[in-house]
Structure formats: structure tokens, C-alpha cells
Amino acid sequence: MTLDLFGPPEAGIDPTPPWREDIAPGAVLLRRHALAGMDELLAALAAVAAAAPFRCMVTPGGLAMSVGMTNCGALGWVSDCHGYRYAPCDPDSGRPWPAMPPAFARLAAEAAAAAGFAGFAADACLINSYAPGTRLSLHQDKNERDLRQPIVTVSLGLPATFLFGGPRREDRTTRHLLTHGDVAVWGGPARLHFHGVLPVREGDHPVLGPRRVSLTFRKAG
Ligand code: MD3
Ligand code: FE
């Protein structure tokens, strides 16, 4: 077994997964939580990406984002020259986003409940694909209607360093290495905290190849 130097404090010993790390009030990491049921999750991911391929969206400023994105669920996060919003249809195909796979919905609800947010029913799943060198700069998630609802993220493939700040952009950040199967839940006092992802380092993940994929579940509508 690989030593996890960024894991829990017990002298570099990887405990039996999953385990929990509280990173701030309202923010918790459920380490390796998605490993059980991973095959079903990856099959569902492949089906969604086949129906709605990853694409680089354009920011309102006119720049192409480097992260590849797609969505599933009733609503999908889209960005173009007009701004950011949630939309029921894929702008590339004109069709509704693929339905939320049951395995996705189940994982999101069950992880949220484990973190203290009972009754979470995600209607939007944004799927980000990061090639090595790709990053997501510091931002807030505030396009959702009900900010009392948490956000649940599943990390897959290559590891990445997640930056977690405070309610103001200039607040100091902590760093958390997220690896395959890690689940993060954010809500309550952490819901509007700034966050981002440092450039993903070169690598080749045995299951997902040279990329990191994140599933971000939200109640958007
Ligand atoms: C902390 N995605 O798509 S998700 C995003 O790994 C996004 O792809 C990153 O940020 C990714 O918007 C990180 C984790 C996350 C999401 C929302 C948060 C962390 C958060 C909201 C408040 C605080
Ligand atoms: Fe975000």
C-alpha cells in the first residue's frame, strides 16, 4: 500500500478507508469515500461523457477555460460570452443534459448526510476534466438559488492540490491534496468560501489515464 503523506496525522499510516477530516466549520473531506461503488460510478461517468462530451467553455471575458466540462442532471452549469448560468440543455447539442445517473445521486445524498446535511437532492452535476498543467483559479460558487444547500465533490484520477480560503479573496488559504475517491462536502459557514485547484501535475492514473476528473453536485434550481 502507498504511504499517504498528506492523509491523516497518524504517522503516515493509511487507515482503513474511508476516514473523515474536518477542514473548516462546514467543510469536511471524506477520504476515499467513493472507492466503494467506484466501478458503477466510472461506468456512469463514461455514459454521460459519451452523450455530452467534455468541452472548454468560454468565460464572459471571452477566454476559453482550460478545464474541460460537461454536466448531467436537470440543470447544467454553462458559461459563454453572456455570463455564467444553469441551463436545462447542452448548448452544443441543444438536447437536455443526460439524466443524473442513480449511482451519482445516491453518492451525493449519502455523502452530504454523512457530513450533516440530510435531504440533499442534487439537480446539477458539473463534471470537470483537468489535463496535466490545468488549474482552476480562486473563485466562489454563488450561482445557486439556495445557498443553504451544500456542495458535494468527488475527485477521480490524478491527484490535485485543492486551495481552500475564506469569505474574502485575500483570506489565507489551506492546501489539501485530493486523490482518487476522495469526497468533499461544503456548506453552512463554508458555502461561499473562495477555493481553487493548483495546476495538476503530470501523471498517468491507472484507471483514468493522464487526467483528473471532478464531479461537483449542487442543488442549483
Ligand atoms: C469550497 N471545482 O467546479 S470542487 C467548481 O475540483 C470547482 O473541480 C473544483 O470549484 C474541482 O466550481 C473544486 C470543491 C468545492 C466546490 C465548491 C465549494 C469546494 C468549495 C464552495 C465553497 C467552498
Ligand atoms: Fe467552485
Image (cartoon, rainbow, N blue to C red):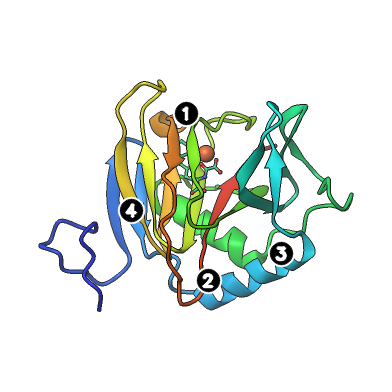
Q: Which residue is at 35% across, 47% downward?
A: 28
Marks 1 and 4, how far apart in space? 21 Å
The residue singled out by tag 3 in the image is 48
The residue singled out by tag 1 in the image is 192
The residue singled out by tag 4 in the image is 177
Can you tell which of label 2 and label 1 is closer to the viewer?
A: 2
Q: Nearer the viewer, residue 202 or 198?
A: 202
Look at the image and tell me whether residue 187 can be seen: no
* Mark 3 neighbour density, 10 Å: few (under 14) some (14–19) many (20 or more): many
- Which amino acid does the dot numbered 2 rest on? Leu
* Mark 1 neighbour density, 10 Å: few (under 14) some (14–19) many (20 or more): some
Q: Quadrant of the C terminus?
A: top right
Q: Mark 2 or mark 1: which comes first in sequence?
A: 1
Q: Percent x, y for residue 114?
A: 40, 54
Q: Nearer the viewer, residue 71 or 145?
A: 71
Q: Mark 2 or mark 3: which comes first in sequence?
A: 3
Q: Secondary structure at mark 2?
A: loop
CB contact under 8 Å: marks 2 and 4 = no
- Which amino acid does the dot numbered 3 rest on? Val
Q: Secondary structure at mark 1?
A: loop
Marks 2 and 1, how far apart in space? 30 Å
Q: Which mark is residue 76?
A: none
Q: Mark 3 or mark 4: which comes first in sequence?
A: 3
The residue singled out by tag 2 in the image is 208
Q: Percent x, y for residue 143?
A: 63, 30
Which image quadrant is residue 142 in? Answer: top right
CB contact under 8 Å: marks 1 and 3 = no
- Which amino acid does the dot numbered 4 rest on? Leu
Marks 2 and 3, how far apart in space? 15 Å
Q: Mark 1 or mark 3: which comes first in sequence?
A: 3
